[in-house]
Image: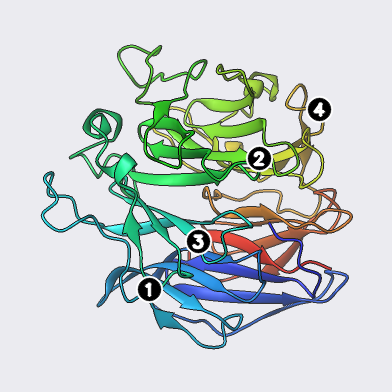
Amino acid sequence: MTTMQSDPRVLVGTRKGLFTLSGSTDRRRWTLGEPEFLGHIIHHAVVDPRDGETVLVAAKTGHLGPTVFRSCDQGRTWSEATRPPAFRAGDPLGRAVRSVFWLTPGPVDEPGSWYAGASPQGLFRTDDGGDTWEPVDGWNDHPSWGEWAEWPDVEGTPDGSMLHSVNVDPRDPDHLYIGLSGGGVFESTDGGSDWAPLNAGCAADFLPDPDVAYGHDPHCVRVHPADPDRLYMQNHCGIYRLDRPGTRWTRIGDNMPRDVGDIGFPVELHPRDRDTAWVFPMDGTDVWPRTCPDGRPAVYRTRDGGDSWEQQCVGLPERGWLTVKRQAMTTDAAEPVGVYFGTTSGEVWGSADEGGSWACLASHLPEIYSVEVAGTP
C-alpha cells in the first residue's frame, strides 16, 4: 500500500510477464499497458512507497534464472540486479535460490533498503535500492533453520516451499515477521540476528501433532499499518488475528459462514482502520480444488476484527472456477478505500467503494501472481 497522491496504477505480476493498469483519478476508467518481461514469471512487483519512483520486480526468467529487476523511473527503464539474492558460496546445505518470491520495502528512514523472500526459504536484504543483495545470515544460517524450513523438500507446496510475508514494524526496524510455507510464522526483535516461532493457537491439521511450535503453513501475514500491534493471517488452516504483546493467535475464521469456510490465500487490510480486512475464500476441502467454494466468487470483509464477516460479490460473476494467490490482492489509501485482486484465470477486479461493488479492470491475462497499487488519488 502507498500514500502517493497521483493517478493510480496497478502492477500485475503474471506467469508470463508484468502488466500495468493505469486509472483515472476517480478510479472509474482503466487502461491496460503492453506487457514487460513477456514470457517470464513475475512473482511480485512493488513500488517503493518512500519515493514513488523505484519499482522492484521479483522474476524467474528462462535464461537469467531467479533475479530482481529494478527501475528508478516508474518502470520506463529497467536494469537487473548486479548481485541478485543468493545463498553464500559453498553453502553447507547445498541450497541455491530457485525463485525470488516476495519483496518488501525497508523502513522509512532507511531509503534503499528492501527485503526479499525466496524458495527455498531464504531471506535477503539490499541497502542500495535492489542492485546488490546479501543473505540475512541470522535467518539463513540459524541453527534451527533445517528444522523450521521444509528442507530438502522444496516441492512441499505447488510453487515450491518459500519464505514470504516479510513485515517490518514501522516503529522499530529491528522488529521483523516472516512467513514460511511450510514452517510457520517467525519473529525477530534484533534485526534478523535471531528468530523464534510465533504460531501458538494456529491449527496444523496436516501434521501428526496439530499442536506444534512450528511446521504450520501460513499463506499470508499482514501487520496493520495503523496499529502494528494488530496482525492478521490467512493460513492453510483458517483465518487468524493476533494482538500483541499477546503470543496466541485467535481463529477469527470460525466466524465465517460454514458453507464457505475460512481457507484461502490473501488477506488485505484497511490502511486506517485496524478492524477492517478482506479475504478471498477458496475450496480447501478434500483434494483442495483451489477454486471458489461452490464455484461462486466472493470477497468477504470484516469491520470488527473478525467477529463477523459480510459477503461482497456485487458485480462479480455468478459462477467462476478460480482463486486468488497470496500476493494477488491489495488495497489503496484513498477515501473510500479501493480494493483490487487478480485471479488465476487472468482477470483483475477492482472496487472503489471498499468492496461494495466490483468491476473487471482487465481480462484474458496469464495466471496472476501479484497485484500491487502504485499511487492513489
Q: Quarter of the image holding residue 282?
A: top right
Give the amino acid at mark 3. Answer: Ser
Secondary structure of the residue carrying tag 1 is loop
Q: Position of residue 181 (x, y in %)?
A: 38, 38
Q: Position of residue 355 (x, y in %)?
A: 80, 49
- Among numbered discs 1 and 2, the one appearing first in the sequence: 1
Q: How crowded is mark 2: few (under 14 residues within 10 Å), some or many (20 or more)?
A: many
Q: In which quarter of the image is the N terminus?
A: bottom right
Identify the residue position indicated by label 2 in the image: 279
Q: In which quarter of the image is the C terminus?
A: bottom right
Q: Quarter of the image holding residue 138?
A: top left
Horizontal side of 23 relative to 65 (left or right) equals: right
Secondary structure of the residue carrying tag 3 is loop
- Among numbered discs 3 and 4, the one appearing first in the sequence: 3
- Between residues 70 and 353, which one lies in front from this camera angle? 70
Residue 290 in view of the camera: yes
